[in-house]
Image: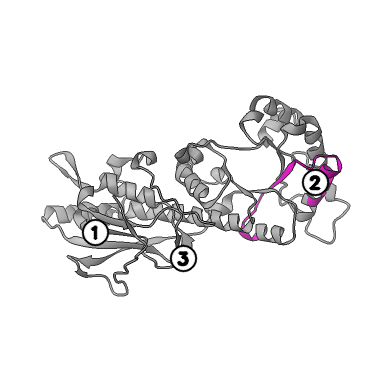
Amino acid sequence: MSTRVSARLEPEIFRLPVDRIRAGYYSDAYFVYTKELLEAEGEHPHMTVQVFQKEVSLLGGIDEAIAVLKTCTGREHDGEWVDGWDQLVVHALHEGDEIAPRETVMTIEGDYSLFAHLETVYLGVLARRSLVMRNVHEVVEAARGKQIFYFPARHDHWLVQTGDGWSAHVAGAIGVSTDAQASWWGGTGIGTVPHGLIAAYGGDTVKAATKFAERYHRDMNFTVLVDFDNDSVATALEVAEALGPTLWGVRLDTSEQLVDRSLHNEMGGFDPTGVNPRLVEKVRGALDGAGFSGVRIVASGGFNAQRIRDFEAHGVPVDAYGVGSSLIRGQNDFSADVVQLEGKPCAKVGRSFAPNPRLERVQ
């Protein structure tokens, strides 16, 4: 499955805090000092900086990194910012490109004093967005074409939602849970009837689902959590009977510390806790037996790529997976090195200019 996005996002979409980035507020101080020193000494070294990382991955955040360069390259003169983007030559890959370890993903050529202060920011953008994109792509591949819902918003700071949601979208997630996560492509957040609303209706899942459906079912694939009473089979049937064709799916989200009531007489040959294959099979069998074969099953709660692979390998009848915190864990760090000075080799020992014919000139 190709994830490449050829058309680049415009800088305006990122809503960057341009003034603060220009001032070095988000940069490692030594890069700010470097810029200040070069300017004070009247030095304008023409350098080539190349950016790479060390994993088999997908490239995320490259348009955002380019936006940082486009809007924050330059210098202050007599209290006014003098833009320097037109003095740089930048080549880069695209959002969603598959990348190899140590493959050059971007080069920046020009007066180093114009962009030395930006390294911390653009590397951080690439690291975060590529991490999310790689992780989402991995679970999408594991799910073998089944839908993946991106649900990690509650596990991280709200400020990361916009770009992370875009990366998840590019990597193949079918839905995100907040409007912020969907904003860069003009989408909206999706979700299910939550436990909090069920509690607000006294623990009555059917009543909460019915009220929710009356107002919102036309806006989404209507899905209901059915584990509030820890009796997913019975609750799924009750919800299906009450909502009929309005119901798109039921979501299983049993805690890994609990055993669903429907399994109490079957324990012994498998791990009965949480959302396990046997629980899914029992819910599927009950729905089919009652004439609700069109109701989908969404499995969530502690899922990652390996767990999804296991479910798929055993043919567990899941229609979609909700995946949360595992999609924002791990690392995918990027590095930037000066590799040329005035067109001649100049790099720290162990690094050298590594041209990549896949790079395209950024306009």
Q: Is residue 96 left or right of residue 219?
A: left
For label 3, the crowd category at 10 Å Cα-Cα, with few meaning under 14, some 14 to 19 and many 20 or more, is some
Which residue in the structure is indicated by mark 2? 283
Q: Is residue 107 magenta?
A: no
Q: Amino acid at mark 2?
A: Val
Q: How many badges with numbers are in the image?
A: 3
Question: Which numbered marker is on residue 109?
Answer: 1
Chain-order first, disc 1 or disc 2: 1
Coloring scheme used: one colour
Which residue in the structure is indicated by mark 3? 55
Q: Residue furthest left?
A: 42
For label 2, the crowd category at 10 Å Cα-Cα, with few meaning under 14, some 14 to 19 and many 20 or more, is many
Residue drawn at (33%, 40%) of the image: 17
Is 276 in front, or is 31? 276
Estimate the spatial distance between the alpha carbons at disc 1 and disc 2, rounded to whole Å.
59 Å
Quadrant of res 89: bottom left
Estimate the spatial distance between the alpha carbons at disc 2 and disc 3, rounded to whole Å.
40 Å
Residue drawn at (35%, 39%) of the image: 12
Is 152 in front, or is 47? 47
